[in-house]
Image: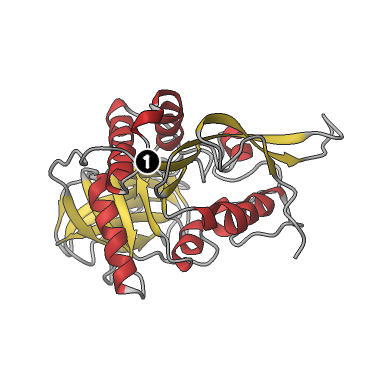
Amino acid sequence: MRDNPITTTVDFDADGIHHGFLKLPHSHDGSGWGSLMIPMTVVRHGDGPTALLTGANHGDEYEGPVALMGLAQDIALHEVSGRIIIIPMMNYPAFMAGKRTSPIDGGNMNRVFPGAPDGTITQKIADYFQRTLLPLADVVLDFHSGGKTLDFVPFAAAHVLDDANQQARCIAAMQAFNAPYSMILKEIDSVGMYDTAAEDMGKVFISTELGGGGAVTAHTVAIAKRGVENFLKHAGILAGDPDTQPTVQVDTTGEGCFITSESRGLFEMCIDLGDPVQEGDVIARVHDIYRTGGTPDEYRAQTSGILAGRHFPGLVDMGDFLAVIGTLE
């Protein structure tokens, strides 16, 4: 397989705090011999594990970039044992455009792994993570939130895995992150995901969903900042013990947790995030936007728990995600 065209302006093996770029050649109308410059920081101090920290896998999700930009600015070298690779804006073109996917090639970074060194811009970035960055890492944290189309209770997540030992290590890292909610998650389609690429290599991997709507709040940013420090302490890279507070354990692996729209129209949410839900409760209604006087379509909970996630904008289309119910452990 050909080499990836991405180079770095930092040395992964040099002690110190180094700010630089992943540099990807990108010829376009504005710069025929240009490069896409993806900001990054590498912190190394002595021996220890390597953590790979990423945000903006989807470009309209901002808690991760805010927390990781702050970490890159504030981290003290003497507190580190090992190495931290910080890439606050993983899908940089999408981030700069404020979009979920890349405006250059339409690529969804979390659906193109393992990528390709001779593919599109998004595929080249994914390939560099697949073949260069992930092999360096022992533990991986990928920040997500709902972006412009989803909203969630703030949770950290670990996946159901075939390897029970690996799953237990991921769950321990999730619990150490210590978001207000901690979720055991089974993806509806894990093919092509960054998560899957890391987990298939045996890495400790956790992700988050820390709100939504395409903006941050002081509350969700505080969760992200505290969580990444907890994650690094749990890994033994930062000194000290994680700062733990009560967390609600939820599960979305059962039948009926995910609700999908079979209608197009005006979206009415009937309960709020974090509210308790009983099987049979009306979760949402979708109203006909083409005429008055019709009866809205009702969507009911197929299981009991809490409302953990919801569609965000006021209009909904057939096939859109409507809601997810988290069952309580």
Whether residue 306 sits left or right of residue 289 in the image: it is: left
Whether residue 187 sits left or right of residue 17 in the image: it is: left
One can see residue 269 in this view = no
Q: Residue furthest bottom?
A: 162
Residue labelled with disc 1: 81
Whether residue 99 sits left or right of residue 299 in the image: it is: right
Residue 145 at x, y percent in the picture: 39, 43
Which color scheme does this rendered protein use?
A: secondary structure
Residue type pointed to by label 1: Ser
Foreground pick, 26 / 302: 26
Q: Residue at x 32, y 49 (%)?
A: 235
Residue 231 at x, y percent in the picture: 31, 45
Foreground pick, 108 / 132: 132
Q: Residue at x 35, y 74 (%)?
A: 163
Residue 221 sits above or below residue 184 on the image: above
Residue 50 at x, y percent in the picture: 44, 48
User: How many residues crowd around disc 1 within 10 Å: few (fewer than 14), some, or many (20 or more)?
Assistant: many
Residue 298 at x, y percent in the picture: 29, 58
Q: Quadrant of the N terminus?
A: bottom right
Give the tally of numbered discs.
1
